Image (cartoon, helix red, strand yellow):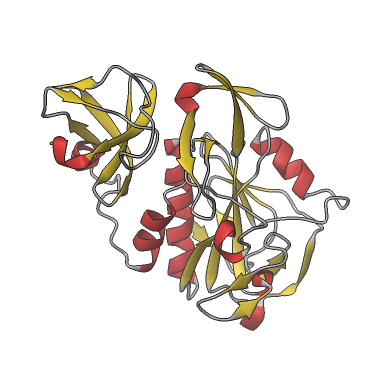
Amino acid sequence: MEINEKHLLIGDVRWVRSPNHGGYLENKTPDTIVIHYTAGSSAESSVRSLCSEKSKASAHLVIGRDGSIFQLVPFNVAAWHAGASAHTETGRKGLNHYSVGIELDNAGVLTRQNDHSYLSWFGKSYPASEVLAAVHRNQQVERYWHLYTQPQLEACLEVCRVLAAKYPIRYVVGHEEISPGRKVDPGPAFPLEKFRDKILDLDRSDLDHDDDEPAAAERELVVNIDRLNIRTGPGTSYALARETPLKEGDRLKVLDRQEKWVQVSHNGLVGWVNGKYLK
């Protein structure tokens, strides 16, 4: 995948032109990437909305849950994705003028119906295996969040690397960071700190998949004590994700990390465990 002279992605990308954009970016080049979620039912429906003049909104890219990529606006042109926004690190306002906006197909905040069903604002139900219970960085109450898929995260990482190779990308931020109180995307289900490190510091060891065996080993750990509680968030203050603890020898797929806590998946159950009890 690469970016051509017209500031379009070349590769397995679908180009769908949106009429919703402004003039050129500052210096005609982006130095910031803003990550969003769509809060929609599918990538295709979000693309249609972002390409409708009535919506008065757009983004440069939409990434589907299967890793499919849509480009709506060239990277040197201001898309309408950030809205009223400010970046505390630079003091800049109106991040549309400096950034590439990436929308990830994700339902966002969900409402718990029962132990096995969670409902989106648009009426679609999701199973517990696709849900994370967590407290948002800008909030104090635990809520339920739609999980991102591995193909989606891998596609987003690849796109961000291509952008960083082409443009002087200095900042990777979530919409929630530049519009706190107004926006909560991409939310706690997105590994924002990890992405920021991988793109800006170029430390890509645990998100690289060029070498299949090391990548698989990095993404899977084994419980090394008799009983290990799995919780809904990264800390003992969070409720148990399941009453029955994990047992020694259980193999867990690693999804994210926050300090000593590791987000894992096991037989469809997603939750957090203390990393010192894994090997």
Q: Please tell me which residue is depicted at 16% across the width and 28% down the height of the picture.
A: 223
**Which residue occupies the foreground of this view, 74 or 225?**
225
Q: Is residue 247 above or below residue 184?
A: above
Query: Front-most of 81 and 247?
Result: 247
Residue at x 23% of width, y 34% of height: 220
Q: Residue at the spot x=66%, y=34% of the render? A: 42
Q: How many numbered marks have been drawn onto this rendered protein structure?
A: 0
Q: Is residue 108 left or right of residue 256?
A: right
Say whether residue 249 is left or right of residue 14.
left
How far across and down, in percent of the image, does residue 59 sit?
Answer: 68, 56
Residue 78 position in % (x across, y down): 70, 68
Residue 8 in view in this figure = no
- Residue 116 visible in rendering: yes
- Residue 165, image quadrant: bottom left
Residue at the (71%, 25%) spot, across then down? 123
- Of residues 145 and 157, the one drawn nearer to the viewer in this rendering: 145
Up the image or down, 208 lies above or below 41; here it is: below
Farthest-out residue, right: 54
In which quadrant will I find the C terminus? top left
Task: Using residue 125 as the reference point, say whether residue 255 is left or right of it.
Answer: left
- The x and y percentages for residue 187 are 53, 47
